[in-house]
Amino acid sequence: QVRLVESGGGVVQPGTSLRLSCAASGFIFSSYAMHWVRQAPGKGLEWVAVISNDGKSIHYVDSVKGRFTISRDSSRSTVYLQMKSLRAEDSAVYYCAKGAGHEGGYDYLQNLWGQGSLVIVSS
Amino acid sequence: DIVMTQSPDSLAVSLGERATINCKSNQSVLYSSNNKNYLAWYQQKPGQPPKLLIYWASTRQSGVPDRFSGRGSGTDFTLTISSLLAEDVAFYYCQQYYSAPITFGQGTRLAIK
C-alpha cells in the first residue's frame, strides 16, 4: 500500500526552527520527486518545495527561500523539510506529496498526499 | 510566477445537476513541444488531504468516476461534474505544474442547493 506519513509538527515560537519528516512506503522512493505543500487554517493550498528523485534539483516558493530546506534520504525513504526563522504566517498543515514521476512534467504533478502535520508558530 | 484564478469562489448545485468550475491562468500552461497542458484539478474534503482528480487538463486519475471531466487549453480550463452526488461536496482546486513555483487557484467551495 502506497503511504506517506508526516511527523515533526508542533507549536513553536517565532524565530525558532522545526524539522518535518515524511516517511514513504509502498513505492520505489528513489524513482519519484517529492513535494511539500501547506495549508493555513481555513485557507487554500500553497505549494512550498520540490526535490527531484535524485535530489539534484530543488525549487522553493519565494516566501520560504533562504529559510526552508528540503532534502531526502533514499536509504530511509524519507523526505524532510527543515524550517528556520519561523514566522506566524508559516502556521499551517504541511502535507508531504509524492510526484507522479521523475520527469516530463510528472515530477511536478502530485498524485498522492499524506495526512499532514500541523505547525503553529506563536508566542 | 503563474497566477491561477478560479471562478466562482463558491457554488451550490442541486443533486443530479451539472456543476462547472472555471480556472484561468495569466500565462499559457500549454507546452508546445508535447502539446500538453500542465493543468491539474484536486478535490479536498473537510479534514482530508487533497486528492488528484484530473491531470494534463483532461486525463482522469485512476479510480476517479467518469462524471468528473476536464477540458480547456492554454489559459482557460473547466472542471465539470456531470451529475452531482452528495459525496462531491468539497473544495476544488486547479493547479499549474508547468513551472516552479507550482501554483494553485484559490479554490472553489461546492455545496448542495
Image (spheres, rainbow, N blue to C red):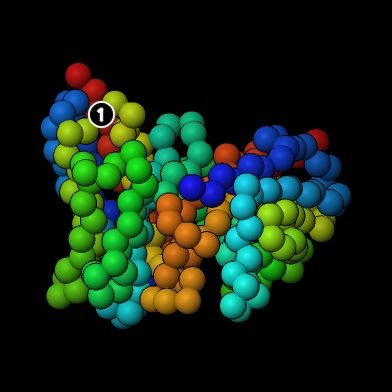
- Image quadrant for the N terminus of chain A? bottom left
Q: Does residue B37 lie above or below B82 as drawn? A: below
Tell me which chain the residue with mark 1 is part of.
Answer: A
The structure residue drawn at horizontal position 52% and vertical position 62%, both measured from the top left corner, is B98
Residue B62, how many percent across, how many down? 59, 74
Residue A73 sits in which quadrant?
A: bottom left
Residue furthest toward the top?
A123
In this rendered view, identify the residue nearer to me: A6 or B106. Answer: B106
Residue B111, how many percent across, how many down? 71, 39
Residue furthest toward the right?
B17
In this rendered view, identify the residue nearer to me: B31 or B108. Answer: B31
The count of marks equals 1
- Image quadrant for the C terminus of chain A? top left
Residue B28 sits in which quadrant?
A: bottom right
Identify residue for label 1. A87
Left of B99 or right of it: where is B53?
right
Left of B107 or right of it: where is B113?
right
State whether residue B40 appears in this view.
yes
Q: Amino acid at mark 1?
A: Arg
Left of A10 or right of it: where is B76?
right
